[in-house]
């Protein structure tokens, strides 16, 4: 059983009468800059005010190197303020992540927001290697294991006991997706994150009351009874431009909102008061909808700005429904999970009727599935001959020969990277080592837009969009709701995944041992 975090943030999240407010801080490069001094001064004012329950600190936001979150976190914690540390998967392998978590536990930095992280940008002498050794679901599993005081030994067959950690595990989901395939995969991944032990949810950035309502309804339909905080982000003009152009992954400024902000920018204050007022209206809406709280952020905000938003929102709480039209910027032609309630401008409780099948036909997928079932399902016609052959090659230490044959065939068909631990069957016969820039095994990140990968917009489609389309063409899309694909075992690199499957060395064999 997991050891529970004893933070004030958790107590606030559990209190249904407490609308939990958090505020996001974004460190920059350098360790002794004026920006960090301003962040700490703002943190002091927020701590003295008392309305904000925790200060969230990003880790290398935007993919750029920045001051580590625990550096500011320990200073802010000394102000008697709760902090949320972002745990990003992009720069660390699993050993470094575990080591870092030991340190955070010792520093009592137990509130975490687990994210895949923005793809790394150019740094010292060029572009760094993206790591993404674990995805968010796998990182949650690691945290749950640490909270139970367990640690796998080198053979991963038994578990040793350590002092239990007590991490509170937050995750992110985005209801702000235009396509059915993108939105449904976001929700399916949320189900996996909750199954892996997520304790609370924060939404990605978007500006539409009905979309915020949609997420609550989806969670209710699927009995996800964990707190959710709506994201209230207050952009300045440069950030608005970047979001509108799709240059900040996962953050959406629609065309209608962009035109509104451009119009507001003609005012003497360049639209600042209008942006703060919109944030206050969204804050009131979130409380009225039944959110557990809100996650507030934005570049260059002062405490006076924050105070204005909080006070204005409090004054609007009783009339929050009148604010809905002022925070409704999602295009009608986009995909909606639920039907619209014309009386409220929100959603009814009825999901949209979606065809059981896509119009697309994927012969390569169908053929791959057929061949796989014949060769690797225990009732397949080729299962026993395939098993006998692979184990014979393994016993005769001729696995390199079979590995070369296997890799040649699968590289031509699937872009195989010869990882030795194949997940094609779980991912609609698309290889994540080749098809996903972040090598994700348990669902997409939040960065895709219009079906395109955040790293290669306009040139490479999100792998999970393609997975959804393939699965739905056969009515199998709900197979992505459950399951856990463990991280790649690098000891199997450049070996035969066929041999590893039949000998029980691949992830399927490890899952059986773990179970």
Image (cartoon, rainbow, N blue to C red):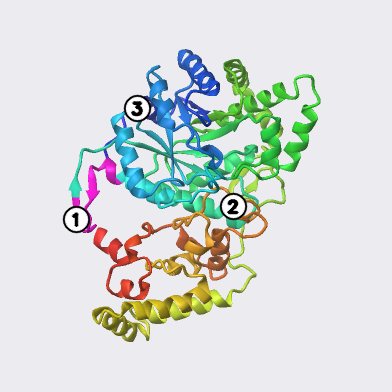
Vertical relation: 182 (above or below) 295: below
Classify 10 Å Cα crowding around label 1: few (below 14), some (14-19), many (20 and above): few
Q: Height in image: 248 above or below 286?
A: below
Quadrant in which the N terminus is drawn: top left
- Residue 15 in view in this figure: no
Question: In the image, what residue occupies the spot 78% across and 36% down?
Answer: 259
147 within the magenta span: yes
- Which quarter of the image is occupied by the C terminus? bottom left
Span highlighted in magenta in the image:
145-159
Q: Which mark is residue 7?
A: 3
Mark pair 1, 3: CA separation: 31 Å
**Residue at (67% x, 23% y) in the render:** 277
Q: Quadrant of residue 345?
A: top right
| Circle 2 crowding by C-alpha within 10 Å: few under 14, some 14–19, many from 20 | many
Q: CA distance from mark 2 to mark 1?
A: 39 Å
Choose mark 3 or mark 2, whichever is in front.
2
Percent position (x, y) of residue 220? Answer: 48, 44
Residue 376 in the figure: left or right of residue 51: left
Secondary-structure class at tag 1: loop
Q: CA distance from mark 3 to mark 2?
A: 36 Å
Instruction: Give the mark toward the camera: 2 or 1.
Output: 2
Q: Which mark is residue 158?
A: 1
Using the image as rendered, state which of residue 505 and residue 482 is in the foreground. Answer: 505
User: Left of 183 or right of it: where is 498?
Assistant: left
The residue that label 2 is drawn on is 455
């Amino acid at each position: 059983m997991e050891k529970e975090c004893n933070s004030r943030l958790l107590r606030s999240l559990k209190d249904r009468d407490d609308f939990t407010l958090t505020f996001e801080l974004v460190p920059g490069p350098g360790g002794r800059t004026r920006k960090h001094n301003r962040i700490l001064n703002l943190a002091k004012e927020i701590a003295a005010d008392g309305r904000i329950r925790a200060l969230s600190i990003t880790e290398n936001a935007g993919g750029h190197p920045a001051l580590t979150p625990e550096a500011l976190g320990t200073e802010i914690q000394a102000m008697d303020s709760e902090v949320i540390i972002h745990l990003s998967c992009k720069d660390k392998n699993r050993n470094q992540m575990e080591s870092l978590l030991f340190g955070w536990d010792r520093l009592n930095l137990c509130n975490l927001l687990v994210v895949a992280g923005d793809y790394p940008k150019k740094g010292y002498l060029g572009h760094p290697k993206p790591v993404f050794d674990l995805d968010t679901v796998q990182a949650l599993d690691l945290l749950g294991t640490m909270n139970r005081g367990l640690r796998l030994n080198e053979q991963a067959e038994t578990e040793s006991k350590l002092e239990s950690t007590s991490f509170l595990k937050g995750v992110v989901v985005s209801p702000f997706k235009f396509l059915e395939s993108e939105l449904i995969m976001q929700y399916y991944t949320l189900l996996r994150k909750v199954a892996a032990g997520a304790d609370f949810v924060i939404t990605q950035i978007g500006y539409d009351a009905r979309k915020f309502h949609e997420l609550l309804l989806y969670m209710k339909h699927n009995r996800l009874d964990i707190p959710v905080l709506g994201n209230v982000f207050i952009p300045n003009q440069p950030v608005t431009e970047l979001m509108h152009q799709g240059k900040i992954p996962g953050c959406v400024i629609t065309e209608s909102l962009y035109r509104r902000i451009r119009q507001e920018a003609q005012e003497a204050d360049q639209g600042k008061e209008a942006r703060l007022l919109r944030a206050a209206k969204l804050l009131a809406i979130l409380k009225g909808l039944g959110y557990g709280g809100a996650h507030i952020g934005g570049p260059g905000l002062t405490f006076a700005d924050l105070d204005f938003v909080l006070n204005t929102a409090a004054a609007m709480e009783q009339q929050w429904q009148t604010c809905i039209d002022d925070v409704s910027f999602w295009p009608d032609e986009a995909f909606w999970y639920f039907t619209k309630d014309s009386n409220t401008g929100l959603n009814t409780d009825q999901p949209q009727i979606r065809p059981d099948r896509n119009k697309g036909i994927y012969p390569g997928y169908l053929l791959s599935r057929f061949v796989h079932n014949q060769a690797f399902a225990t009732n397949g016609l080729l299962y026993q001959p395939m098993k006998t052959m692979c184990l014979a090659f393994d016993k005769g230490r001729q696995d390199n020969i079979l590995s070369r044959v296997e890799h040649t065939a699968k590289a031509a068909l699937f872009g195989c990277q010869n990882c030795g631990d194949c997940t094609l069957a779980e991912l609609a016969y698309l290889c994540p080592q080749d098809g996903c820039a972040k090598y994700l095994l348990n669902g997409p990140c939040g960065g895709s837009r219009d079906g395109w990968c955040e790293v290669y917009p306009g040139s490479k489609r999100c792998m999970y969009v393609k997975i959804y389309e393939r699965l739905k063409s056969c009515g199998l899309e709900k197979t992505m709701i459950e399951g856990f694909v463990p991280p790649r075992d690098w000891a199997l690199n450049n070996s035969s995944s066929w041999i590893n499957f039949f000998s029980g060395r691949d992830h399927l064999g490890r899952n059986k041992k773990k179970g």
